[in-house]
Amino acid sequence: MKVKYLFIGAIFLLMAYMVYNATSQPGIQDLKGNFQEVALYRNENNTGPITRIYAVTVEDTLWGEMKKYGDFMPHTKYGTTKVYFFKAGSMVPKELNPKEKDFEEKYHPIASYEKDGMGEVLFDI
């Protein structure tokens, strides 16, 4: 009888640990810099490569935090994810598009992050 209760208790502890571990993972909200997503573009193509482009404001030039932010963004195999970082309070595009330039030339990001179709990351300051 005691073995049965020990077994049930062990299963309960294991499940409690799994729930705690799943809910305590770091995320975007844990990064310094007060990141605010201003604009997003995602193509409608669900059968081929997915293109995602983000315009994000940040309060400080924390390069490491910006790279981590880009790493947290969703990415699809063979797709492309781009994140443009703008200083908070500066001019930021409200609309993005997947053309040669993702936004008008009057906007000047302080950094950009790109993950290509093969998963390679380019972080440009």
Image (cartoon, grey):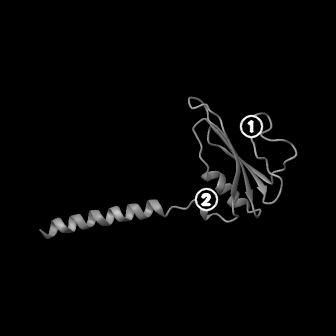
For the residue pair 88 and 82, the one nearer the viewer reads as 88
Q: Left or right of 102: which side holds 117? A: left
Q: Residue 29: horizontal and vertical position, in percent?
A: 60, 62
Considering only order in the chain, which callout, 1 or 2, is on the residue closer to the N terminus?
A: 2
Label 2, secondary structure: give it. helix
Residue corresponding to mark 2: 28
Label 1, secondary structure: give it. loop
Residue 33 visible? The answer is yes
Residue 124 visible? The answer is no
Residue corresponding to mark 1: 97
Q: Residue 80: horizontal and vertical position, in percent?
A: 65, 39
Q: Which residue is at a point 59% across and 46% down the rendered structure image?
A: 74
- 105 above or below 69? above
| Image quadrant in which the N terminus is located | bottom left
Q: Quadrant of residue 63?
A: bottom right
Q: Which residue is at a point 60% across and 53% down the rendered structure image?
A: 72
Query: Label 2 sits on what residue type?
Result: Ile
Check whether the beta carbons of the residues at disc 2 and disc 1 lie within 8 A of each other.
no
Q: Residue 26: horizontal and vertical position, in percent?
A: 55, 62
Badge 2, how many Cα within 10 Å: few under 14, some, many 20+? some
Q: Left or right of 108: which side holds 3? A: left
Q: Give the Cα separation between the discs numbered 2 and 1.
A: 24 Å
Disc sitting over residue 82 in the figure: none
Q: Quadrant of residue 10?
A: bottom left
Q: Which residue is at a point 73% across and 63% down the rendered structure image?
A: 62
**Hey, which residue is sitting farthest front in the picture?**
94
**Hey, which residue is sitting farthest right in the picture?**
106
Q: Residue 54: horizontal and vertical position, in percent?
A: 70, 47
Q: Nearer the viewer, mark 2 or mark 1?
A: 1
